[in-house]
Amino acid sequence: MVNNRVDKDATVCVSVFDSLAELLHKRLEAGVVHPKVMIETNINPKFIGGRLHLNATSWNHFILTMRWPQTIIYLRST
């Protein structure tokens, strides 16, 4: 699990596993990945080419982008 501080008042918690968690942590520390905005949806991943968990339940999908002014406003207000 990676906790990343996006802003002085906004912290993002990302659940990843095994070697992917370590890779993401290293990239975030090195500044290679610049976290921006997180939007959560519960769309079935099969509709967008994703995968289901082993227990066949859908998962939440996060989109990180600063292109939407609404997300910038949201982060500033929290």
Image (cartoon, rainbow, N blue to C red):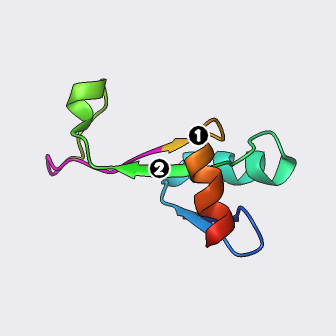
The residue beneath circle 2 is 39
The part of the image, by quadrant, that contains residue 29 is bottom right
Q: Main secondary structure of the magenta part?
A: loop
Work out whether 10 lies above or below 51: below
Nearer to us of marks 2 and 1 is 1
The residue beneath circle 1 is 68
Residue for point 77% across, 73% down? 8
Magenta span: 55-62
Distance from disc 2 to disc 1, alpha carbons, whole Å, reads 10 Å
The crowding category of the residue bearing disc 2, from other C-alpha atoms within 10 Å (few below 14, some 14 to 19, many at least 20), is few
In this view of the protein, which residue sits in the foreground, 1 or 36?
36
In this view of the protein, which residue sits in the foreground, 54 or 47?
47
Name the amino acid type tagged 2: Ile
Residue 68, given in percent of the width and then of the height, sits at 59, 40
Work out whether 51 lies above or below 35: above
Q: Are marks 2 and 1 in contact (CB under 8 Å)?
A: yes
Which residue reaches farthest top?
49
Residue 60, given in percent of the width and then of the height, sits at 33, 51
